[in-house]
């Protein structure tokens, strides 16, 4: 006798054998017992949750001559012929390959014939969402008022694709993802029946990989049993080409430490070990999803499927993460999932890791907000290596010389408009030596910029810098400087701030500095003349 796959061999034959769908099976049993079955059912839910299985059990039950508490007896002639696939009154149609209007018209012609040996003629239409629009229209009238001896059972994984006119004519049942504990219980039962040794941690890992689908779980168990009769976590990871918990934790640590080199080297080792890149990405997303749940759900039963030892590891790693970093990582990984479907999977995952280890290269709004938040939370340290310069008087109301406001700064007052009253000249306030100081090691900042951002380093080639309070004022003769730092993308300003912080030991706000206008400001009459010129007053 040919080998039969486990999911077929152990497919439930009664409602009582169905795992995790009690809210549906109890309702169907009551309808059968009370004789209140309807003419059209719609079973919807994710794959492997029991839709087709329950459809077959329902088809057997409505024709069974000796029901047992709403379950088919499996002993009468009707049940035996159904189990052997010989009952011509139970018709299964695959809508994926029979989706034309001609197929539905042929079905409409056949339903008028009375059942050959059963009470009802049952039509099970699987993947019904694959029907064409014209086929749906042809099915409508028949589905609404079929002959009394006909029952339709429609099954689909994508109920949103069904027309509302079809939905309104069916009694709908939504199949849930099966609880991981119930999957583990079923796996242990089947392993015992098959003479397999299955550890609890391996069963948990299979349940996690199955994502709530019993059929997928049994398929994985079948695959593992072909490799080894003693099934543990290592066997499951090897057979399913999973990365493993240790690899995931280590890779997450590299991402946290911004260690691009080791992250890419680990990815290369996993690739050479035949780990599927798309599965690795899925497992990495699940890993960070678990970290997100641990960070946000502090008490009660967390919706995480894992062993107790792995839970402790996740909790320890979650303690080192900020929730914003976890959300950013999940966002980047989720975006890479769609790109990997059509592109080079390894390259796409490498690009995602580089972006996660180097968030400064990302230009999306979320990454910019994270970098600004990091700058805001940085401690301001005393300024070092600064030499004072001669006093430079301050010019009032000169907008160009004032530091330009950043995203996180309070905007400075605007200059007077044409209609505003012209302010009277006031005595110029002379700054003290401690107000404005030149940065004597500005060349060290430029050296750092040459490696981190060559473009801005070239623009600031002959520049000088001064410290005034919380501001770092840059004196550059290159006209490109003001244009670059005023752009919406704050990448250039971010590079300057980081380089200056490394040398000066403090974080400053940026602004332009014009030495010529500062010198001109020493003469109040020249200052007033400039203001009159700007206001077009001759």
Image (spheres, helix red, strand yellow):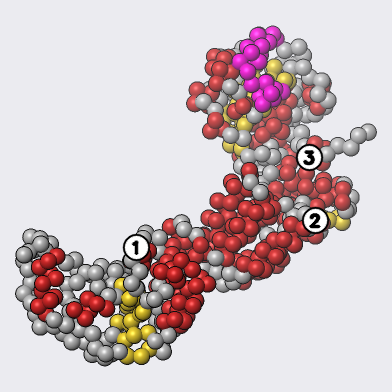
| N-term-proximal mark, 1 vs 2 | 2
Instruction: Name the residue that disc number 3 marks.
Output: 7
The answer to which quarter of the image holds residue 204 is: bottom right
Residue 363 located left or right of residue 260: left
Give the quadrant of the C terminus. bottom left
Q: Which of marks 1 and 2 is in front?
A: 1
**Is residue 93 located in the magenta-colored stretch of the structure?**
yes
Q: Residue 494 carries which label?
A: none
Residue 383 located left or right of residue 85: left
Q: Which mark is residue 483?
A: 1
Determine whether label 1 and label 2 are within 8 Å by CB. no
Is residue 222 something one can see in this rendering?
yes
Residue at the image position 31 percent from the left and 86 percent from the top: 437
Label 3 sits on a secondary structure element that is: helix
State which region is magenta: 92-114
The answer to which quarter of the image holds residue 456 is: bottom left
Instruction: Name the residue that disc number 2 marks.
Output: 238
From this view, report whether residue 463 is shown above or below residue 414.
Answer: below
Label 2 – label 3 distance at C-alpha: 21 Å
Label 2 neighbour load within 10 Å: few <14, some 14-19, many 20+: some
From this view, report whether residue 369 is shown above or below residue 195.
Answer: below
């Amino acid at each position: 006798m040919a080998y039969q796959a486990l999911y077929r061999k152990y497919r439930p034959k009664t409602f009582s054998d169905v795992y995790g769908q009690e809210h549906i099976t109890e309702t169907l049993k009551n309808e059968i017992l009370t004789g209140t079955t309807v003419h059209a059912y719609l079973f919807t839910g994710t794959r492997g949750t029991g839709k087709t299985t329950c459809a077959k059990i329902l088809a057997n039950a409505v024709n069974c001559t000796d029901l047992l508490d709403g379950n088919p007896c499996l002993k009468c002639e009707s049940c035996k012929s159904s189990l052997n696939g010989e009952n011509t009154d139970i018709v299964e149609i695959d809508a994926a390959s029979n989706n034309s209007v001609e197929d539905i018209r042929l079905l409409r012609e056949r339903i008028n014939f009375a059942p050959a040996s059963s009470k009802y003629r049952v039509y099970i239409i699987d993947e019904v969402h694959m029907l064409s629009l014209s086929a749906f229209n042809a099915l409508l009238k028949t589905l609404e008022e079929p002959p009394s001896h006909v029952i339709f059972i429609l099954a689909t994984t994508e109920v949103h694709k069904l027309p509302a006119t079809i939905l309104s004519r069916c009694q709908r049942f939504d199949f849930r993802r099966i609880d991981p504990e119930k999957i583990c219980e079923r796996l242990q039962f089947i392993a015992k029946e098959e003479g397999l040794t299955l550890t609890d941690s391996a069963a948990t890992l299979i349940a996690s990989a199955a994502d709530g689908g019993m059929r997928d779980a049994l398929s994985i168990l079948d695959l593992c049993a072909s490799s080894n009769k003693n099934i543990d976590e290592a066997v499951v990871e090897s057979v399913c080409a999973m990365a493993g918990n240790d690899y995931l934790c280590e890779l997450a640590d590299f991402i946290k430490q911004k260690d691009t080199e080791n992250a890419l080297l680990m990815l290369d080792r996993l690739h050479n070990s035949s780990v599927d890149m798309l599965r690795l990405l899925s497992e990495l997303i699940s890993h960070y999803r678990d970290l997100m749940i641990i960070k946000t759900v502090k008490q009660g039963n967390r919706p995480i499927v894992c062993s107790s030892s792995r839970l402790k590891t996740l909790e320890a790693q979650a303690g080192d993460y900020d929730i914003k970093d976890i959300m950013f990582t999940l966002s980047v990984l989720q975006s890479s999932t769609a790109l990997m479907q059509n592109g080079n999977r390894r390259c796409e995952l490498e690009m995602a890791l580089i972006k996660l280890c180097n968030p400064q290269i990302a230009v999306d709004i979320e990454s910019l907000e994270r970098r600004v938040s990091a700058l805001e939370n940085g401690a301001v340290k005393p300024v070092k290596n600064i030499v004072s310069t001669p006093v430079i008087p301050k010019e009032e109301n000169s907008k160009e010389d004032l530091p330009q406001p950043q995203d996180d700064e309070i905007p400075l007052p605007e200059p007077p408009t044409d209609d505003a009253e012209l302010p009277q000249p006031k005595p110029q306030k002379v700054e003290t030596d401690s107000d404005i100081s030149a940065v004597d090691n500005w060349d060290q900042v430029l050296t750092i910029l040459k490696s981190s951002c060559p473009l801005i380093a070239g623009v600031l080639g002959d520049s000088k810098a001064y410290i005034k309070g919380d501001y770092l004022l840059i004196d550059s003769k290159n006209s490109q400087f003001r244009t670059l730092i005023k752009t919406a993308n704050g990448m250039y300003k971010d590079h300057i701030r980081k380089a200056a912080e490394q040398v000066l030991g403090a974080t400053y706000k940026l602004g332009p500095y014009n030495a010529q206008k500062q010198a001109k400001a020493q003469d109040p009459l020249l200052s007033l003349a400039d203001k009159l010129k700007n206001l077009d007053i001759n």
